[in-house]
Every structure is written in C-alpha cells, then in structure tokens.
Amino acid sequence: MTDSIRISLGARSYDVLIGEGLIARAGELMAPYAKTRRVFIVTDQNVARLHRPALVASLEAAGLANWTVTLPAGESNKSFIGLEMLTRHLLQAGAERGDLVIAFGGGVIGDLAGLAAGLVKRGLDFVQMPTTLLAQVDSSVGGKTAIDTPEGKNLIGLFHQPRLVIADAAVLRTLPLREMRAGYAEIVKIGLINDAPFFQWCEANAADVLACDPPALAYAIRHAITAKAAIVAADEREQGVRALLNLGHTFAHALEAHAGYDGALLHGEAVAAGLALAFAYAAELQLCPRQDAERVNAHLESAGFVTDLRKLPGAPFVAERLAALMKQHKKAVAAAPTLILAHGIGRAFVQTQVDEIRLLAFLEERTQ
Ligand code: NAD
Ligand code: GLY
C-alpha cells in the first residue's frame, strides 16, 4: 500500500509517497517531472552499493536516460568541497535546465544534492528519495538544503523544494541500528513539540520502531511526516511556527560543530542530547516541570541514546566553545542565541533574549 501526504505550498506543492517497494516504481512515479527524460542520480558510496541497481533498473524501464554521481559517505561531505565536487560533476556530465536531479541517500545527500540542484544553472528540479529513517521522517520534506562550515551547521543554504518525495520503507532494512536510532530522535521530537499522546506512543513503541517492525515503523513515519507537513505548510520560510521543528537543535548543532562533523557524533545523536538539554534547561529556569524533563531523559536513554555530555561521542566538550557556537546559530538574533525549549511534553516554545551567563553556567555544569 502506498500512502501519499500532500505538502501544500501553492505552486511549490508536492506529494510525499510512502510505502514498501517504491524504488521499483520510481521511474514511472517521477517520469512526469523529467521534462527532458534525463535524470541525474546523486548518491553516496553505501547507498550506491546497496540500492542503486534497483533504482537504475526502474529508471530504465520507464525510459529515463540516467547518470550517477557517487560521493563519499558521511557528514564531512556536506561541505564546500563536497558542493564543488558535485556541482562540477553535474556540469561536466552536461546537466541542463529541464533535467531532473534525484537525491538518493540520507540527509547528507538530500541537503547537498538539493542545494546543488538549487544552484546549478540557477535551479534544476529535484526529487528526494530518502534512504535513512532520519531523511524519510524529516530532512527530505520541507525544502531546506545546506552545507556545514567550521563556523557552524547549515549556515550556507537555500530553500529549494523538491517536486516529489519517494520514501521506500523497505530500504531501511539495510540501515545499521545506530542510524535507525539517529532517525528516531527526529520522530520523538514531534511528540515533544506539540503532540503529547504521540510521545506516549513512542514510549510504548520505540523498540518496535528501532527493530523495523513494519506496522510500528509505518505508523511512526506517516505520523512524523504528517506533522511536519502541517508545520511547513503553515510557515514555509520559518518566520514563526516552523522554528519549533528545531526543538533542542541550537544545543545539537553546537555539539556537532564542536565534535567536528567527522562521524564521531551523528546528527540524530546530537539531536537526542539537545532534546534532553532543552528540557533540562527549561526545568532549571522553572519553565517546565522537572518530572517532564526526567521523563524525556529516561525515554531517550531507554532508546539507547547518550544524554550525558561527558559521555557523548565527541567529548570532552568545552562550555565556552559550545556557547560561542550557539551564538553563531542561524536563529541567533542580535548575536544572542535563540533556544527552542518546552513548557512541558508537547508544549515547545521559542525563547529569545537568552540569559547568556545562566546558559554558560548550565553548560559548564554539564560538561565538567
Ligand atoms: P547520512 O546521510 O550521513 O546517512 C547516514 C549513513 O547511512 C551514511 O553512511 C549513509 O551512507 C548510510 N545509508 C543511507 N541509507 C542507507 C541504507 N538504506 N542502508 C544502509 N546504509 C545507508 O545521515 P542522515 O542521518 O540521514 O542525515 C543527517 C543530515 O541530515 C545532517 O546533515 C542534518 O543536518 C540533515 N538534516 C536536514 C534536515 C532538513 O530539513 N534539511 C532535517 C534534519 C536533518
Ligand atoms: N528540520 C527542521 C526544519 O525542517 O525546519
């Protein structure tokens, strides 16, 4: 069965198709968007090895001429060097306006290929084919594309919406457990933002989702995408409510930049630690019940995440450096960090005018 969720953005609207075995139908599904019948697959070495043959067979069956650009895997390729390599490959392969780019991989490939598609010849159309849980439930939907720099995460980027998203849950069977867990962080985040019953569902079903149990996984993916679709439709360019999708992310992005994008700390692992920190900090400011912060932390730990910064991959973290990175975050206003915190489970809010001295003391307490 294939589910379809509409991302309603006027002329930029598109569908997210979710189901098992969709790679075999990818050619037929994306053919209406391939005006020149020429497509460029952008992927990484792991996904190419495991899943490219099935995609190519499906494109050929639909009569789509195709070329593949295969990049090394990992966050470190979401960089200026990775972007240069990819955009120049596309130009050298003769990509033209009217050709279609396929981002076939996790969030790294989605963000990088989406950005390259937005830049080459001032904009090519692209399709997202997310192959990690994280990319299926979050990064492939909503049109944010970016690369990282030493100054911080995702600071160079564009909004460039895909024409279609094809999420084949069957490809997740080859995904390592650590990567499944990283994606689960963005699922549980949805419950913590504005959906306490869904958080409760997560508490009861996390193990089944992580074990790729088909009904639990399908429910979690559909629920997370539906929630994200509503927020993106209400606020495509993040002028308001979309910021809530970054609950805990000001902490998370600083942890990732501090760790150095070398694969030691995965984005989803940083998000889980960031969610725990956001609740702990809100509790310390007496903006959130302490029991809620403890419940969130307990759930994340029972799902296998590390929330103690002293033990998190990438440690030791230096509080002053984390605080400086948080000021550099995209959401900073007048050089002061913006935090997405919560008044309780399912009650996220945006906090500007953060007390930097108090925040630094909080970080010092957790890093020493
Ligand atoms: P990733 O793209 O690095 O993929 C993780 C690993 O899994 C890689 O080694 C990849 O080769 C491998 N892989 C991918 N699919 C596989 C499969 N089916 N089987 C086996 N291995 C597979 O990481 P990710 O967690 O998917 O994405 C993280 C990135 O997403 C971060 O850069 C983050 O900033 C970004 N992100 C963007 C948004 C957005 O809105 N644009 C939202 C959330 C996260
Ligand atoms: N992942 C945050 C957003 O899409 O807005």
Image (tube, rainbow, N blue to C red):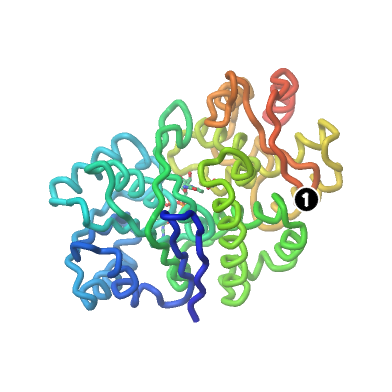
Answer yes or no: is residue 340 visible. yes
Q: Secondary structure at mark 1?
A: loop
Residue 119 drawn at (x, y percent)? 29, 41
Q: Residues within 10 Å of mark 1 (few under 14, many from 20)?
A: many
Residue closest to the far front = 10
Closest to the observer: 232 or 259? 232
Q: Can you identify the residue that label 1 sits on?
A: 345
Residue at screen point 23% across, 54% down = 69
Left or right of 165? Residue 225 is right
The amino acid beneath tag 1 is Ile
Q: Is residue 111 above or below residue 133?
A: above
Closest to the observer: 80 or 30? 30
Residue at screen point 27% across, 75% down = 58
- Quadrant for residue 79, please give it: top left
Residue at screen point 78% across, 50% down = 345
Closest to the observer: 97 or 244? 97
Residue 317 drawn at (x, y percent)? 59, 29
Mark 1: is the Cβ under 8 angstroms from ligand 2? no
How many numbered callouts? 1
Left or right of 197? Residue 273 is left
Q: Is residue 215 above or below residue 166?
A: below
Left or right of 36? Residue 136 is right
Q: On the rendered image, what quadrant is the C terminus found in?
A: top right
Answer yes or no: is residue 278 visible. no
Closest to the observer: 249 or 277? 249
Residue closest to the far bottom = 1
Residue 229 drawn at (x, y percent)? 56, 57
Residue 326 drawn at (x, y percent)? 59, 27
